[in-house]
Image (cartoon, helix red, strand yellow):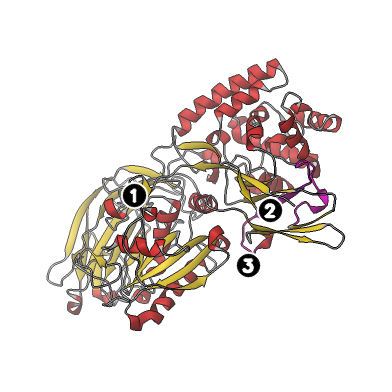
Amino acid sequence: MSIVKRFLVQAVVTGVSLGQFCEHQWEGKFANHEVDGVPYLQARQDVAPPPLEIRPLIVNGPSSNRVDLIFFGDGYTKDQKDKFFADALFLANNITDGQTFFDVLPILNFWAGFSPSNESGVGTGGKPLDTVYGLYRDGTELRGVYYDKPEVARAACQSTDACDFPILLGNDPLYGGLGGTFTVTTASPNNGPVIIRHELGHSIIGVGEEYDGGQVYTGVNSAKSTNSVPWTQWYTDASAEPKIQRTNMPIQAYPWALLNTSQSWSQTFMSAGTYSTHLLQVSVSGVTATSDLLVEIDGMDAGWEWNPAVGEDRYIYNIKRGEALTPGEHEIKFTLMNEERQGSAQLCSFEVLEYGDEGEFDFEPRYHGLYPTFDYKNATSYRPTNDLCLMRDTYSANFCDACIEGLWLSLLGRLNLIDNITQEAQPDGSTNATLNLFPLADLRQVPNSHQEAYTILWYGVDGTTVLKNWTNSTTALLGPDITEFGVEVRFWTEQIGLWFKPLFDVRLSRQKLDDLKTYTLWWCQFFESTVSDFEVIHEAFDANPCGMTITLDENIQAYLHAHICFKIEPYYLLDLKRYDSEDIEMFLGYILWRVSGDLDARKGQIPEWDGLNNNVRRFCLEAGCPRLVPNLFLNIDNLREVALVASSRSREVALQERIQELETQLEEYHGTTVQIIHELPIADIE
């Protein structure tokens, strides 16, 4: 059996991770950047790596086809080696045990690399201790932890094959961290997992903040206006959007003030008095009891209570207040009540948020819509959820749907769904071929709660004939007459809600990518279809399964025939005969309803996603989860090619008109924030 080939077609949203303040005031040298056009981590240098003892923490496959996260310890002396490995394992388990990175865990590895430091701990006041990577705090406040020796950290990363995302773990029991080229966290038992989840969101997904008061809001979780929203596929109620959730931030501050008993810390702010409720968020450290601190609004106790689980560590408290603020001036006051906490108790930050009534603001955690976020200048951008996402509420263990989709895209874009293919000769001359795939979908050892599916097609010697006996099987017994074979593997997850054909389509066949260019996007024709066309489509299928392809070249025709195509099937490469006509009709109606400009006319006639039956959901899943108005993923050049190969001139005119409409919509709604289609070159594998 000879060489098998693959290609990967991806549709991705572009996202740039800049130097984010992340309330940790990092930018410049701490942000992801390049050296002479080469990513910092890959730039070669003459600095020797520190001596490293590397141990596996969680290993799910070879580093050559997994994303490797590795902890490098800082401030751990040689006598604290066991503590370092225990701290690293605690963090790795915490962020993957049923939460946060659990869904993508099968494609991740976690490692820990120990190098002894001469001093124990993390530096303060902007001065690092004598440690391997020189971690330090800017002052005494519990926020950013920075590194003084990035070249040493880079050398450590380059010295091992198990370093895609390096994490510098500081031997410190209190809050602090950083995102960027190196993710930084501490061994705080309460805040360490909180910080690393959030900072890895910056480092891996490439997104900005969602909490208020930051400086960088970018990526798949941020929109500058209601006309450039990258998560429309995740709207809970698309027919109601764009609806801006009504909220306001009359005050926010980061005092970083040490409190004392002789004088309260206070500040005034103004409210218009037009909102229904408000929330006070307070972040403090160095207190050990509720009686240590009194928090007041307008002279009334705001109801702050200390969280005993965090001890003296920093914690962010959300105090929900069910009444409206009256119009005019208000005062917020912080008074230290325990003299023994002077010099330790610190007011880190606070803010007040006002909310509209239940018809104006949706507090449902999983509701995805348009929620205003206010930066350090009180300028507004938008985020997907209220406080579900850990990029806003760092104590949440969950990403919003937009961020988890971005996580999948970032990770899968680096990998191949197939670890390897083994071939074992049988006594009768046949060959038993076996695929080793990522343990996702039905292959997961520990199931997750989301719909996932693999589709597997095996091909014979001609590269087009499907060996149906082995469809969706990871093994195939190939007869002696089959001297070459191909296999196509696709993975779908409902956590990737893109309209375009299944995102991670790994083909291992002899078909050339160049032969498929005119095939890439045929769904433009789909816009001109109606539900009533369904029976006509079936009749066309029965008469000539690939009647639409007669104008295409032979290579493309062979490819389409191999997938049992018919008039509408080429969009998804599916045999729709497997589905009941009523299911497909409902699906077609659902799509037309989602893309129709006449939403009012169709409202109530077609069920929302949650109302679709299992067959239709399955079909939608295999078709790429069409929960997104598809304007976001268009390849205009390919649509022009479709028009050229249309079977009738009238169709060509209609398609050209539709192309013009789509181009206009693309510019109007999505600007330049969409990267349309990437076609990666064919690569040979043994």
Measured in 3D between alpha carbons, the distance from the residue under mark 3 to the one under mark 1, in whole angstroms, is: 37 Å
Q: Is residue 335 left or right of residue 34?
A: left
Note whether 70 is above or below 566 in the view shown.
below
Q: Secondary structure at mark 3?
A: loop
Write down the quadrant of residue 635 in the picture. Answer: top right
Q: Is residue 592 visible?
A: no
Q: Quadrant of residue 105?
A: bottom right
Magenta segment range?
Answer: 444-473
Q: Tell me the distance, in whole angstroms, between the alpha carbons under discs 3 and 2.
A: 16 Å
Q: Is residue 669 above or below residue 287?
A: above
The residue at the point 13 percent across, 67 percent down is 263
**Image coordinates for residue 50, horizontal then vertical, percent:** 34, 70
Q: How would you rate the neighbour count of disc 2 (Cα within 10 Å): few for under 14, some for 14-19, many for 20 or more?
A: some
Q: Which SS class for mark 1? A: loop
Vertical comparison of 638 with 448: above or below: above
Say how many tags the image has.
3
First reached walking from the N terminus: tag 3 or tag 2:
3
Residue 460 magenta-highlighted = yes
Q: Amino acid at mark 1?
A: His
Separation of disc 2 and disc 1 at Cα? 37 Å
In the picture, the disc for residue 33 is 1
Q: Is residue 222 left or right of residue 124?
A: right
Asked where in the image residue 264 lies, by quadrant, the reply is bottom left
Specify the principal SS of the magenta part: loop
Say what secondary structure mark 2 lies in: strand
Tell me which label, 2 or 1, sits earlier in the chain.
Answer: 1
Identify the residue under disc 3. 446
Residue at 71 percent across and 32 percent down: it is 556
680 and 408: which one is in front? 680
Q: Which residue is mark 2?
A: 454
